[in-house]
Amino acid sequence: MSGSFLKNMAGRTALIFLLIWTLILPWPCLAQAAEMTVKKEKELGERFHLKVAAAKVILDDPISSEYFKKLTDRVMRGAGLKPGQYHFYIIKSDGINAFAVPGGYIYMHSETIISLENEGQLASILGHEVAHITSRHFARRVEASSKFTLAYLATMLAGVALASQGGASGAAVGQALMMGGAGASIQAMLSNSRDDEAEADAKGRRFLSKAGYNLRDMYGAFKIMSDKTYQISPDIPSYLSTHPALTSRLATTFRDLEGSAPSPADPAYRAFSDRIMALTGDDRRVQNVMGKRLSADKNDHSALHALGLLAARQQNLANADKLMQRALALSPGNREYLADLGDLAIRRRKPEEARAFFEKAGQDSRQAVLGLARASELLGNNSRAAALYDKVVSMSAEPSPEALELAGRFFGNAGQMGKGHYYLAKYFASLGNLERAIFHYKEVARQPNAGSFKAAAKREADYLAEIQKEDKKK
């Protein structure tokens, strides 16, 4: 696990707090190597992710998620793993970072995606993080420690968090918790060592090659990460602090790749990066970047569409529609643009117009299927809406929170209370809201028409209740 990033975590993401509460579990001393099993790692990852979700820092955008999943599936196959075996998420953060958590949870900061140039470079970073997990680097450091219980480690992390949040009271409490040299010992245990990095580099390079990417992209990715890290505020998490000795590794491990031919231009990745910037970036920055692009090329439809997404984010729906329509005219039939225009039409209370856009976007897109379900519901076609809500929820092992919420409310209103409560339970669980998730899971059991949802709901309710119980103890 990437540990050094905890020290400098910006207030916006607050991920440090999430790790604290996840680690406060009734586990034995870390020195007992036999206790840090693969099963324990999985439990830690699951509980960590619930806390990340509760902080509302994960990007929920079906179009971005579909592109990201195709990429991560390819990386997983290159690593000899099954797609879906690990979980990948985009974190809304202006820090340059990526980190892996035991149990197969990998998080990529949005700024990292924006900073890279092509898909192969992003695959390089992801492959490196996959290698950290397959090598069980965090588990090995935990097993080597003879000083701390997880509860004590969590207390020290809390000190780091409070000290980094600013304000006199926070800093004072933080310093009180980080007494003596224990803070340095905690950081040493959580940070990746040079040996860890060397192993992850070698494995990641192999994964990238087997996935069919240009190995030159690995050098390009780490060079960009190194250069960018020095340009940002010290209060923002750094890839260099998370992954030490990157500069020297560029001169040694990746030296043979520097002179090889770079990958060609990657319009699909640029569209993905533009989308991430438009959905997560600072408003003024998006305006400046996309404005400069359009000054250089007035037919840059990706920049136009990004400005449309920004306008929609700012609730300027009329301007968003104008910009998106211009982008679509320059890229006729672009399914992402069509789906976004459909969403915009829903927000503008024009379900007929929305339905037309979504139908043109095609039903292999999760955003388009969800949009068609919403439009059908608004137009009173409940039978079609029901089929489409069921379809969109089943299209992914991890449906988007928005899809789960809309489906849950629709089926509840339609009198299918068992299914409605089940989807709403999954929605609240996806947000890390254990109390509301448990409530809805328990409601499933009370419904006479719950059918096959009952057994699954009981299982999930019991699991979340145990986590909630342990959190309250600590």
Image (cartoon, rainbow, N blue to C red):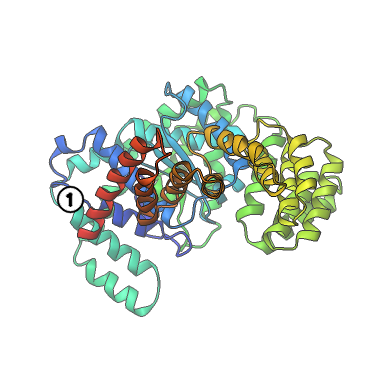
Q: Residue at x 46, y 59 (%)?
A: 13
Q: Mark 1: few, some, or many residues within 10 Å (few <14, many ≥20)?
A: few
Q: Residue at x 35, y 56 (%)?
A: 435
Residue 192 visible somewhere in the drawing: no
Q: Quadrant of the C terminus?
A: bottom left
**Res 164 → quadrant:** bottom left
**Res 45 → quadrant:** top left
**Res 103 → quadrant:** top left
Residue named by callout 1: 26
Side of 181 relative to 162 (left or right): left
Residue 189 % position (x, y)? 25, 48
Callout 1 secondary element:
loop
Side of 271 relative to 155 (left or right): right
Residue 463 visible somewhere in the drawing: yes
Residue 39 % position (x, y)? 25, 34
Nearest to the observer: residue 213 or residue 341: 341
- Residue 70 against residue 339 in the figure, above or below: above
- Residue 263 against residue 450 in the figure, above or below: above
